[in-house]
């Protein structure tokens, strides 16, 4: 899994960010899954954060892709230009 990945719902702006938990990655890999809604000209509305084992996060990614979620560029955070 890349360091970070983003998926967006097929109908709407609901977004999930998958990000490695750096404190656990070398021993027992875990992933943070943040759910939120990017808002124009405002900070995003962050709704939930889950911490999943790497295998469970990968399964969630696959299920969401099968449901029509699509990969998108970063929607919030340091990687997004203000």
Image: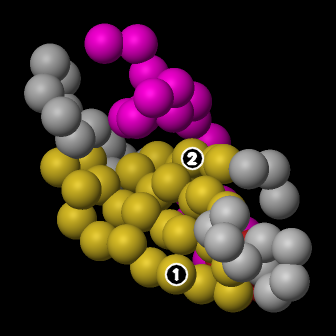
The residue sitting at 78% across, 79% down in the picture is 29
For the residue carrying disc 1, how many other residues have a C-alpha within 10 Å: few (<14), some (14-19), or many (20+)? some
Residue numbers of the magenta segment: 59-82
Q: Is residue 74 left or right of residue 66?
A: left
Q: Is residue 68 magenta?
A: yes
For the residue carrying disc 2, how many other residues have a C-alpha within 10 Å: few (<14), some (14-19), or many (20+)? many
Q: Mark number for residue 51?
A: 1
Q: Is residue 58 left or right of residue 10?
A: right
Asked if 18 appears above or below 42 in the picture, the reply is below
Q: Could you tell me which secondary element the residue under label 2 belongs to?
A: strand
Note whether residue 59 is visible.
Answer: no
The residue sitting at 54% across, 69% down in the picture is 32
The residue sitting at 57% across, 30% down in the picture is 73
**Where does the image place residue 75, in percent across and percent down from the top left?**
42, 34
Q: Could you tell me which secondary element the residue under label 1 belongs to?
A: strand
Asked if 38 appears above or below 50 in the picture, the reply is above
Q: Mark number for residue 6?
A: 2
- Please report contact status of discs 2 and 1: CB closer than 8 Å, yes or no: no
Asked if 50 appears above or below 82 in the picture, the reply is below
Please identify the quadrant where the N terminus is shown. bottom right
> Nearest the camera: 65 or 17?
17
CA gap, disc 2 to disc 1?
15 Å
> Nearest the camera: 60 or 76?
76
Could you say which quadrant of the image residue 80 lies in?
top left
Residue placed furthest toward the top: 82
**Where does the image place residue 64, in percent across and percent down from the top left?**
58, 67
Note whether residue 3 is visible.
Answer: yes
**Where does the image place residue 4, in percent across and percent down from the top left?**
66, 48
Please identify the quadrant where the C terminus is shown. top left
**Where does the image place residue 39, in percent across and percent down from the top left?**
18, 33
Q: Is residue 60 magenta?
A: yes
In front: label 2 or label 1 = 1
């Amino acid at each position: 899994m890349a360091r970070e990945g983003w998926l967006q719902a097929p109908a709407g702006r609901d977004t999930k960010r998958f990000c490695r938990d750096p404190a656990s990655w070398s021993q027992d890999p875990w992933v943070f899954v943040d759910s939120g809604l990017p808002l124009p000209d405002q900070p995003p509305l962050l709704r939930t954060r889950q911490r999943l084992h790497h295998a469970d996060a990968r399964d969630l990614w696959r299920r969401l892709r099968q449901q029509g979620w699509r990969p998108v560029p970063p929607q919030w955070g340091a990687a997004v230009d203000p």
